[in-house]
Image: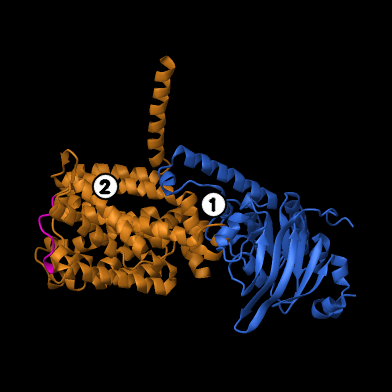
Amino acid sequence: MATATPELDGGVLLKANGLTKTFGGLAAVKNVSFEVREGMIKAIIGPNGAGKTTLYDILTGIYRPDEGSVLFNNREIVGLPTHEIAALGIARTFQTIRLFTGMTVMENVMVALHRRTSVGMLRSSLRFPSARREENWICKEALGYLEMVGLEMQAQNLAGGLPFGQQRLLEVARALATNPRLLLLDEPASGLNAYETSELGEIIYRIRDMGVTVILVEHDMGLVMRVSNEVMVLDYGEIIASGAPHEVRNDPKVIEAYLGSEVD
Amino acid sequence: MESNRLQGQQGGRKIVRVCVNIFQHNRVFILLAVFLASLPFWSRAVSRAIGIDLIYVMRMVGVFTIVAVGLNLLMGYAGQVSLGHGAFFGIGAYTSALFTVKVGFPVWLSIIAAVFMAALVGFLVAPVLRLKGHYLAMATLGLGIVAFVFFRELIWLTNGNDGIRSIPKLALPGIKITTRKGEYFFVWIVALIVLALCNNLVRSRVGRAIRALHQSEVAAEAMGIDVSRQKIKIFMLSTALGGLAGGIFAHLQGYISPGTFDVLLSIELVTMVVVGGMESIWGAVAGAGLIIFIPEIIKAVPKWLGEAPKWVERYSLYEGLVFGLILMLTMIFMPSGITKSLSDMIRYRRNPIHNPFRKKVVE
């Protein structure tokens, strides 16, 4: 298979243990444990409402799990605020696009460089040489990320005015600009056409080649099968299968829960 | 030795370059500065013709520009409503007045104290920023009311409704500012510096962070921005500017009483920001100018007509009505404020394809 790199001897980057989150008695995520090794592309699939986005919200500190722990790079991150988790190196995109729509495409990426720069209120308002140096660096860096997803020509347009597919790409560029070690993509291909989806596949490879580990929540099975090293299937908040893509595809439980009779 | 001197020269040049840099890059800024500098040369003739003392009124415009810019950072850029900003203006005014009258501080030091006091109170009430939308609006409205009650009822400190009299006039170390023109220049130099710094700020890393959290707090957090910290910082900056303006105001007036710092003042400040234009530094100048000039124009009407009609005499009774109406009309017809609407119109004249009015109809 020409899909992903076969050698995955990287250490464990993320280790989730017994994660449980209930909303008013309904378990959105139930006793979920998994590992992500450095340098891999791991896909999480499952029907709508299976708890994938909730899992992301737990990993990024938006929700606090009722039980369980998450070790990122051997550090417990449950209980940390979202912005600190982001600073530690977990970036994400959103299923419902959350761009800064009133800002330009460029500015969206520039915002994401916040943590990698340090000039504060005083020096920015006085336009100290250090502030301008940093601003130049921010511009150059931001443009680099835009080029990576092919949006450099749109840099000065408002993010809210971009076509849908490009908004998704901008979310990816913005997440990458935080210089993450782990990138959580939340249905990046939804709403994209076939051509855009295959482009996205290439971009995901490029991200992996940059040394960023990727978790991919996705409904587009073609994309999942093509890019991922490992697939984990969630149903009603529980892991029902996990393993290499071709194993998972043939797992009768998965077929029943998710893929239905369409796969043969 | 030679190289030392050269370095010294370069260092000097560097400082000059830094100073130039603070003010560069804006045509509006230069136009405004030129206009303000030229005003005293032609103001006398115009003042006599229209019956409004331009220098006198423009001083107040300068003062309110400072608060309005601060409030615009908070409301326009960071998207956090404050309906109680009059409180910080009042805190600044009372702090500076009390420090000069009761403690005997020099005026410039008292104004600095006013800035810090307003920022400190801003810090203490910053937990309200956890509220969102209408809740924040209501909480800040309450803040304005509470401050007003404090000004009126802390009689041992503020003299209650009698107010504080004989507040010394503006002065810098070594310079006494005695004339109205002097006050005018002092106020506007401060205001222009504030404008330039805020204009730099909103175009910087910090400015982008606060605009981002305005649009999506969740996304801003996910980008590594400490949203609550940024909100507190911008709120304190905003209250500090309120305190600065209030401090200067007290020394211009020479007399302050609680009535000036009531809820209506906070509403006026919000009107300045909205009318001038949210997310617009120059909008604050336009908004402050408009809101300060309207009552002056109404008061000048009798001078034009020869005698004062009753509706002019009773202006103070329906002052709030006028501001409310302006606020409503702005929201309906120019929701992005006068500065943006005007620049849109100019753009339309140059390039009819970008017709802002047609766009509205289509939407």
Q: Residue furthest bottom?
A: A25
The colour of chain B is: orange
Q: Residue at x 22, y 57 (%)?
A: B95
In the picture, measured across the screen, residue B39 lies left or right of residue A158, that is left
Q: CA distance from mark 1 to mark 2?
A: 33 Å
What residue appears at the point 52 percent right and 44 percent down from the top-left corner?
A135
Instruction: Provide residue B200's location: percent of width, then percent of height.
Output: 42, 47
In the rendered image, the vertical position of residue B193 relative to residue B274, given as above or below: above
Please say whether residue B179 is visible from this viewpoint. yes
Q: Secondary structure at mark 2?
A: helix
For residue B188, the mark is 2
Residue B227 falls inside the magenta stretch: no
Give the side of residue B136 with respect to residue B252, left or right: right
- Taking depth in this image into account, of B286 and B75 the one nearest to the observer is B75
Residue A235 locus on image (x, y percent): 75, 77
> What amino acid type is highlighted by mark number 1?
His
Amino acid type shown at disc 2 = Trp
The image quadrant that residue A11 belongs to is bottom right
Magenta stretch in the rendered image: B161-168
Above or below residue B265? Residue B119 is: above
What is the chain identity of the residue bearing mark 1?
A
Residue bearing the label numbered 1: A114
Q: Colour of chain A?
A: blue
The number of numbered discs placed on residues in the rendered structure image is: 2
Residue ID at (28%, 56%): B117
Instruction: Find residue B84 and report its image quarter.
Output: bottom left
What's the mark number on residue B14?
none
User: Residue B123 in the image: x percent, y percent?
Assistant: 36, 60
Q: Nearer the viewer, mark 1 or mark 2?
A: 1
Mark 2, chain letter? B
- For residue B361, side relative to residue B328 (left or right): right
